[in-house]
Amino acid sequence: MSLNRKITPPITDAVRFDLQLKKCDHYQLDNNIPVYSINAGSQEVLMIEWVFDAGNWFEQKNIVAATTNYMLKNGTQHKTAFEINEYIDFYGAYLNRSCYNETATITLHCLSKHVHELLPIVAEIITESIFPEEELKTYQQNQQQRLEVSLKKCDFVANRLIDEYVFGINHPYGKYTTASDYISLNRAELVAFYQQFYKEGNCTIFTAGKVPTNLSAELNKIFGALPLQQKPTLSIEHPLQPAAQKKYQVVNDKEGVQGAIRIAQPFPNRHHPDFQKVQVLNNIFGGFFGSRLMSNIREDKGYTYGIHSYVQNHIHNSAWMISTEAGRDVCEATIVEVYKEMELLRNEKIEEEELSLVRNYMIGSVLGDLDGPFQLIARWKNYVLNGLDENFFYSSIETIKTTGANELQDLANKYLQPELFYELVVI
Amino acid sequence: MIQYNRFTLDNGLTVLVHEDNSTPMAVVNVLYNVGARDENPEKTGFAHLFEHLMFGGSIHIPDYDDPLQRAGGDNNAYTTNDLTNYYCQLPAQNIETAFWLESDRMLSLAFSEKSLAVQRKVVCEEFKEHYINKPYGDVWHKMRELAYTQHPYRWMTIGKELSHVEDATINDVKDFFFKHYRPINAILVVAGNVKTDDIKRLANKWFGPIEMGEKYIRHLPVEPVQQEARKQSFEAAVPLDAFVKTWHMDARLNKGYYIADLLTEILGGGGSSRLFQSLVKEQKLFSNLDCYHFGSMDNGLFTIEGKLVKGITMEQAEKAITEEIEKIQQIQVSEKELQKVINKTESVIAFEDMSIMSRASSIAMYELLGDANLMNTEFNKYQAITPEDLQQYSNNILRETNSNTIYYHAK
């Protein structure tokens, strides 16, 4: 019998899968630091992340939070920056730090067999960092140079400006760094921020991978005795100050051959009843390779290498964003097509065929995302930091499976209105 | 230790299966033994253009993505100077969909004029986004042309110039396809929640009927041994001076490759590396500095590149790099420093193999190198390296006459 290649092999609809989120172990250290842990995986590797309430939400002056976080590794009372790095490198480990809006993190990746050698040095940078003046000077100089290079890129400039329009230049989500921010940094500010938000700050620990059986005891011995978690995290309000003007054209490089297009509107956070349903609508609109924006603007017209829409990953408020880099001469045409796609979603009900594809695709990607301990802990961390729990997982699966075309059309009429969006082109 | 089973179909297609029942997913990975190095110098960028055309419909299936997404799957691809790799991941129950899709596009593409016309434009936008509209975006075009006079590593995967892709015709595309995209020139790897017997049945059913094709035998021009230093200066509208220097190094399977890999770690791997500590932190000559290589299968380039602190001259910067190189050539690396970079390598290998997707592509890549089992034994080659090896090899390759330097001046 010859093979008929025109016939699709039968599939199990992904929406019929019963997805289960692996439970996360949860315990507290003696000083009340919460620890979340996923013990899984085939490799002898481990990740531990210390998440502090030390993001730029808490700084009084621009870039203090990020600089403090960056310089944690640049010297303690007992070790120079070089000695710290050499020690960590010797065990083939990676100790990274990152600063976000609400949180700032220290992340250790290592072979499970080396973790006992590495925990003390993490404790050392949390309790004994000294922020040497000389290290700060090097950082200031090199960061300014990096910024100067980044400012030549239209996408970098566009990302800064669109956040400013949506949230306001004084809001943690909308502000950005200038050369003079780096110049005006001083050591005393870093030391004070460190004292308040690290040494005596609030921290949550996440671990994942092949977790050694004595890890919880070890964490407790080393981190459970630190003077953390003594005060509740500062409650600070930052008012949103969205711009009045909606449309912007910026020429950053008059020789530029592409324009960075950003179209965005303010959007509520994960606790809003529309949030999960809008994920479905967003997928259809511009959330994956088969989305309408991608099919039309890349695959049909060839205006761009890629176009995406997404809801920003913020805790307090968010924004719904459309983002692309398009040929300079087709930027206008690209924007016209984006609005056309919004109009279609407002005016025409999504066909069942398209909707079922997107449902299957979304469930399939959640399933793929549950592969491996690091991915699992990332999902749990997201829930914990956003004040959610596993119910959010199960309700979002339910939302993907059940949100109907009528509801999606209503949402399109509620949100996908051109006048709600800020629009920016940076050449 | 990564386990796998291997078998070959009658048409020469090599199949490897890696069973892992801890995941609900499966990965189907097809590696084609063709990269930018196999292109006609007058028609560069084809291997990469194909990466786009492969999604423009195959002979029986008008759209690749749609049925895959409907089966809960996702996919992507990449092209290097050495190879092209396509992979998709989907719930294991639906794996036959991936076999159906991948085998149909190995059988034949649809070769639609519309798809070619659109993807030519998309690739041109990709070219602009990454290589024209970015500061320093053209530096590797220039470096490759300087360092290679004969070998096809002279051009980037995106192509030597935009016109090669812009001028691509359907006939060019067909010729390229039927030369390289045949079972005899491909490696299929299936990983995840699957059974080897089922994969055998599916592979025979879907890939078995495809014509074998002609085995592609690679006859690439050999790069002559460089006899004198090459240097070039450029000026561009960038904010900082940049310095890039490369030296020819050994091919992927030679002992010298592993030594070079450790040397790049000692010089440029992370916060305790020599160049970072000396030139960025202590002497403050560079605002950032990297030392790396590309993992090339043929003789590659050992690279040091960085951006200069304002006010520092190229001469100062280069002199300081030369001093560090002379140091590693004259004074043996300590056992402890060697152990550090070997430990780092051990951990890189462990972290690389976390997902079934990366395991599948590693298996395919090592099979292309000659034997998938290399991925399980390669660490031994690093452990065998001695301080004498490092000293000897650094004297051997990090010579001025083997070097190519670009001075990229800010206007």
Image (tube, grey):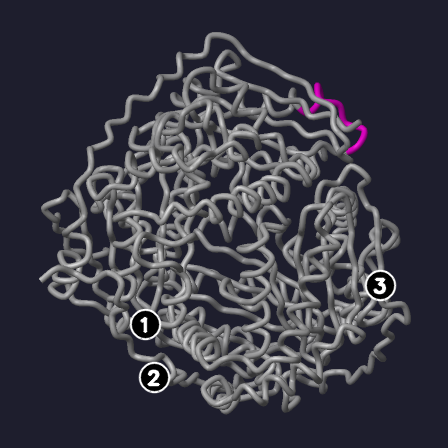
Q: Residue furthest front?
A: B113
Circle 3 residue: A247
Q: Residue at horizontal 77%, vertical 66%?
A: A163
| Cα–Cα span, label 1 and label 2 | 10 Å
Contact flag, marks 3 and 2 (Cβ < 8 Å): no
Task: Say whether residue A284 is left or right of residue A243.
Answer: left
Parent chain of label 1? B
In the image, residue B40 lies at what x, y percent?
A: 40, 25
Instruction: Tell me what residue is drawn at x 45 percent, y 79 percent.
Output: A359
What residue is drawn where x is 39% and y is 37%? B173
- Residue that carries the numbered disc 1 in the rendered image: B91
Q: Which residues are magenta?
A: B310-317
Lower sequence index among marks 3 and 2: 2
Q: Give the residue displayed 77% in from the left and 71% down from the top.
A: A421
- Between label 3 and label 1, give the one nearer the viewer: 3
Task: Examine the image and state in which quarter residue A205 appears.
Answer: bottom right
CB atoms of marks 1 and 2 within 8 Å: yes
In the displayed structure image, the side of residue B239 where residue A284 appears, left or right: left
Of helix, strand and loop, which one carries label 2? Answer: loop
Q: Label 3 amino acid?
A: Lys
Figure quadrant of the N terminus of chain B? bottom left
Q: Is residue B180 above or below residue A69?
A: above
Q: Quadrant of residue A4?
A: bottom left
- Does A257 sit left or right of A42 as displayed? right
Of marks 3 and 2, the one in the foreground: 3
Per the rendering, the mark at residue A17 is: 2
Helix, strand or loop at disc 3? strand
Do labels 3 and 1 touch, CB within 8 Å?
no
Give the alpha-carbon distance from disc 3 to disc 1, as whole Å: 43 Å
